[in-house]
Amino acid sequence: MQDLLDILNLKTHFQTQEGTIHAVNGVSLSLSDGETLGIVGESGCGKSVTMMSLLRLIPMPPGRIVAGSAHFFGRDLLQVSDTEIRTIRGSQIGMIFQDPMTFFNPVIPIGKQVAEPLEVHRNFTRAQALERAAEMLEMVGIPRARDRLSDYPHQFSGGMRQRAMIAMALICNPKLLIADEPTTALDVTIQAQIIELVLRLREELGMSIIWITHDLGVVAGLAQRIAVMYAGYIIEEALVDEFYANPQHPYAIGLLGSLPRLDANGHKRLVSIDGLPPVLTSEPNSCPFAPRCWLAMERCQRENPQLRYINDKHRVACWVDIDSGKER
Amino acid sequence: MSDQGAILQVKNLKKYFPISQGIVLRRQIGAVHAVDDISFDIRAGETLGLVGESGCGKSTTGRTILQLYRPTSGQVLFHGEDLTRMNRNGLRGTRRKMQMIFQDPYASLNPRMSVGEIIGEPMLVHRMGNRREIEARTSELLEMVGLNPGYVKRYPHEFSGGQRQRIGIARALALNPELIVCDEPISALDVSIQAQVVNLLEDLQRDLNLTYLFIAHDLSMVRHISTRVAVMYLGAIVEIALREDLYNHPLHPYTQALLSAVPIPNPPAERKRQRTLLQGDVPSPVDPPSGCRFRTRCPLSIDICSRERPTFRQVQPDHLVACHLVDADTKGGEPSN
């Protein structure tokens, strides 16, 4: 079976006064039908830019997609016309974002906004679309949804706005949902509600999901596969069980060790990764993590490791074999 | 409640913010009950974690303790002295012993002041020595928080978020305080940087014998850093206990729901977990529910919960809870009916 989404060697640069920022540096990822992939990394690692690039939502200039392809249902999203990409966004790929307050237009009623994709992409009449919007809002757990279609965004709480955004993203029954930190601004109890909702909708509607987050805990309960990004590179990718039990890249190990655990008794000092992530202004000829890595060897300083399979389900970009401490 | 070694006691503290309407004829039409009758103490050398969701009043509590907000009523006793009765001059002396670290490392440092001026200012205000002494102390502080003492002439924009938070910590340490209120000091930082700052706070506590009030919404981090933990909901403290007790045997239904909502980075465990999902949102603090404030979302609420506000009482040694459903002799983690 063909993959639903196949990203190959994607590179995105930004022109700034300080020079060219290499934000995404040859990312290759694939997603099969019905799969949930978590993309994890700290701010500035390129996880959002990767997704925005393939949706063609990068402001250009200053942004520029330098290389790569992103095949969705066999069509390269980076090559299709502007009209086509607009049809694909909204009807075949749904998106939800971190901040539901800036997502909705504050002077248009929620119902009309949620219904709009149907009018635009599916030729529904206003009345039909609103009817479907009410059903969809009901489905995402907004009580008395029909009465609230004419409410404005400020009349919804943060959690409810997030639900409405999910309703809008899914109203055209997309095959793929891209979620960019959708729960980061929410409280934990509301986050738990939203995750529960997404899990239920995934079951009912059978879509694939790409979930971008910095929270390794959220991915553990949600995704089948995880990709960790650093400085615009994917540095590790594996099935979640494999990754959490057996992380291989020193950065991933550090990231997991820097999390305090709710499920651990006693007190362990947190692992801290010294230093800061780099801002790349040119193609590096060393491992971008080497300056912060406690295992860095001579080779790490002169050659950037490629993402390679260490077994059939686990890819790592590192010269060091974590178990032996020697070069792979 | 005993006051064994308490350096700070909070008694029946309330802070209401008035809501006004009208431009010419301004009148008060209501109040936000941000902090509504809370009592607790902070013991010398401990870290008291204060957790709760946004809008629950945890930051207001921190600020009211330091008298950055004047309380509506109640007492704040620091070494037995009531801060709420002190005037500005009296407070200035006491404030040397109580400092604060703020959440936003970008907004809490004046962009027009150099690092040296930022850290030196509190010492200047409190006349802690001449220029040379202050400069020497500034270098010492920078070194203490893991920054190069050569950075004194630099400005905040030249630093990353984690480094700025270190500058904020150095400023808080300048006056040799006893108590530091840490108001979400790490929530604006990336995960790997959070660990750096938390480790630093722990080292400083050990070396300088500091007491922390650590305000945060990250329950895992609070578990990591705290000696005792207090849980707030809608302006009230619902439970306070030693760390292990609170996390292993939470008694209040809200604490239980809160803990079950935290994702754990362990996929097999995460799939097996039974979640207590709370319905709906937190009610408005302008018009909080009658009786127990949590009753509108509580899966266990009964008749009495809407009529009477539960008293905050000790049910086990060092374990206080405000819930009608918890018996004084409860042993396990479940509230009994």
Image (cartoon, rainbow, N blue to C red):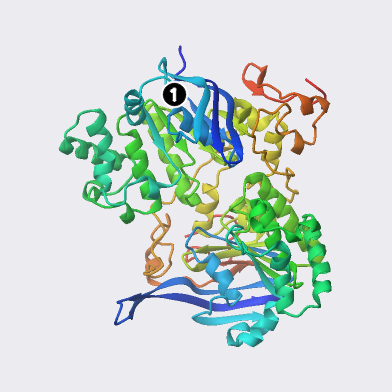
Q: Chain of mark 1?
A: A
Residue B335 in view:
no
Residue at the far top: name it.
Answer: A1
What residue appears at the point 46 percent right and 40 percent down from the top-left corner? A195
Image: B150 above or below A274: below
Q: Picture coordinates of residue B291 (x, y %)?
A: 40, 70
Secondary element type, mark 1: loop
In the shown orientation, is residue A219 left or right of residue B24? right
Mark 1 lies on residue: A34
> What is the quadrant of the N terminus of chain B in the image?
bottom right
Q: Picture coordinates of residue A273 (x, y %)?
A: 73, 42
Q: Indicate the quadrant where residue B295 lies.
A: bottom left
What residue appears at the point 76 percent right and 58 percent down from the top-left corner? B145
**Which class describes the residues within 10 Å of circle 1: few (<14), some (14-19), or many (20+)?**
some
Tell me which amino acid carries mark 1: Gly
Q: Indicate the quadrant where residue B298 lies.
A: bottom left
